[in-house]
Image (tube, rainbow, N blue to C red):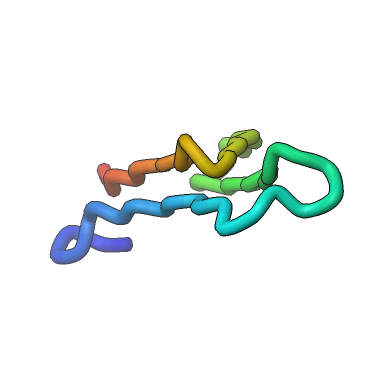
Amino acid sequence: MNDYNNFHEVILVAENLGDIPPNTALMKIKAGDKKYEIKITSDEQKNAVINFKYKE
């Protein structure tokens, strides 16, 4: 990410539910000295979306 490409979108789509629904993901993000954990879920009716915007 930089000033010229400062917006990104991540989409979690469930094509099936597997053995233990719903589909889940844990995203760990490090931005400078800060750390974040984002938990997202999706199923066959709902997708999960995370938007990132770069700021200096």
Q: How many marks?
A: 0
Q: Residue at x 46, y 42 (%)?
A: 47
* Residue 49: x %, y % from top left: 41, 41
Tell me residue 50's x, y (percent): 42, 42
Please provide percent x and percent y for residue 4. 14, 65
Q: Nearer the viewer, residue 23 or 39?
A: 23
Extreme-left residue of the structure: 4
Residue 15 image offset from top left, x and y in percent: 56, 58
Q: In the drawing, does residue 47 fall left or right of residue 20?
A: left
Quarter of the figure that contains the N terminus: bottom left
Please name whichever residue, 27 or 45, is drawn nearer the observer in this view of the structure.
Answer: 45
Query: Looking at the rendering, in which quadrant would you find the C terminus?
Result: top left
Write the residue at 50% across / 53% down: 13
Tell whether 50 sits left or right of 3: right
Residue under the point 50% across and 46% down: 31
Picture residue at 70% right of the left edge, 38% below the top:
22
Please state which of residues 48 and 31 is positioned toward the viewer in this rendering: 48
Which image quadrant for residue 5? bottom left
